[in-house]
Image: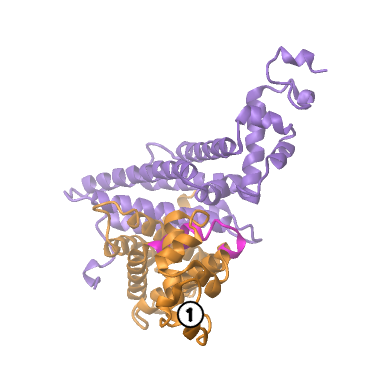
Chain colours: A orange, B purple
Amino acid sequence: MCAGARSKGAACVGGATRNKRVPRAVREQQMLDAGVRAFARSGYRNASMDDIAELAGVSKPLVYLYLNSKEDLFTACIRREAAALVTAVRAAVERDAPADRQLWSGLSGFFAHTAEHPDGWTLLHVQARTHGQPYAREVAAMRTEIVEFVTQLIAAAAREHAREAARARTLAGTEVSGLAHALVGAAESLADRAGDGRAGGPSAKEAAATLMNFAWAGLGNLLQGRGWAPERIG
Amino acid sequence: MCAGARSKGAACVGGATRNKRVPRAVREQQMLDAGVRAFARSGYRNASMDDIAELAGVSKPLVYLYLNSKEDLFTACIRREAAALVTAVRAAVERDAPADRQLWSGLSGFFAHTAEHPDGWTLLHVQARTHGQPYAREVAAMRTEIVEFVTQLIAAAAREHAREAARARTLAGTEVSGLAHALVGAAESLADRAGDGRAGGPSAKEAAATLMNFAWAGLGNLLQGRGWAPERIG
């Protein structure tokens, strides 16, 4: 029964011949879909390769053949979800728009993506950060990339404002980096809140609007040199 | 050798007689100190009760006698650190001060405490959230308490501003709650950044000032009904 498939390489494994015409790349994505879902919902340790194979509609040996081990599958899931999130945010940003519009479009993209991919978000924000260094590093790298992206956006806006106002001083680099960290942390917190799944919770659009209001009215003032009365800091 | 101690109850266990005069409450705190350090630095699974006993300067049986199991020790560590953080933030807030001053004092207290207790912060923010529900619930409860506290602070400020401006409309409850989540997420992100331990990283005071500038200049505008131009939200 499996003889015909053998010439196609790995397609005939453990009774999965009924699916032998599905290309490997497609099959792998289905396994990753199943992995993301299982890891996010059951946790890394509790999710079994049996469950994942069943969710993907393939045999367990085929999962091992394609993705080698549970560790490698977990890594592949994290990488795919991290890349998808970064890509979604970058794609959403309206380049060449005013800084506030860029920020708004990026935030909208972030909240829309995390709302549409709640398992992916849980995988990145909870599971991946807590099962040892190789996984935590993947997520830390993604987070660093997003913080860096936001830092550049704020720095560009600060330079623009300083030029318009003919002011020499712009926000210090460490302050810009701090603001970017604050903004990313605020976005993560609101994405978690939105992902709580409680009825009547805020939509992705509302979360983006709340953070935009919070961040921009604040950043907008800072960019114009109007911080919170620092002379009162005791 | 142990006979004299026996009348004092549990003080003589597994060769720990040299410490028999240390009161149980003090000894327990030393075990929790050791637990927090070990769990934060090695992770829950890798931290061994042998290491923790050695760090605490007691025998392993004494740790089991006082704290029952590794699970219970972990829970006790989380509870102690969560309570300490909430207490530090509440104690730092200058009651009856203007809203901005209250927020500033609370943020200063938060960043000072997390900077002084980096292992406690790692325990709460990383370890406790990822080893199953009982632990995650402890931290979620603490976080809910802090978010609620910040929500009340913002709501009180909003009512105050609305009264001063003789405006009927104040910020909607869901928006206030969203702002509180954003603020807490931003604070967590900056606490992690400060805890990176890189030379030249921001101090607790600088982190508090960055977030205060970011949050208050934003909140201050929102409270006066000046959000980011919402009519431009596409």
**Where is B210 relative to A233, above or below?**
below
Q: Position of residue A48 (x, y in %)?
A: 49, 58
Residue B124 visible at all: yes
Horizontal arrangement in the rendering, residue B191 relative to residue A41 (left or right): right
Depicted A6 relative to depicted B65: above or below: below
Say if residue A160 shows up in the picture: no
- Between A200 and B223, the one nearer to me in the picture: A200
What is the tally of numbered marks visible in this picture? 1
Residue A22 belongs to the span the image colors magenta:
no
- What chain letter is assigned to the residue under label 1? A
Circle 1 SS class: loop
Residue B162 in percent (x, y) is at 22, 48
Magenta part of the chain: A119-135
Q: Position of residue A8 (x, y in %)?
A: 50, 86
Q: Nearer the viewer, residue A185 or B105?
A: A185
State the residue position of label 1: A2
Left or right of A112 in this view: A59: right
Give percent across and percent down for residue A207: 31, 61
Residue furthest toward the right? Answer: B1
Magenta: predominant secondary structure element? helix
Answer with the quarter of the image where residue B195 lies.
bottom right
A125 inside magenta stretch: yes
- B160 vs A148, left or right, is left
Classify residue B139 as left or right of residue B74: left
In the picture, residue A154 is in which quadrant? Answer: bottom left
Closer-to-camera residue (B4/B125): B4
Residue drawn 44% across and 70% down? A58
Which residue does the image show at 43% across and 75% down from the upper left? A29
Q: Check disc 1 and give the amino acid type.
A: Cys
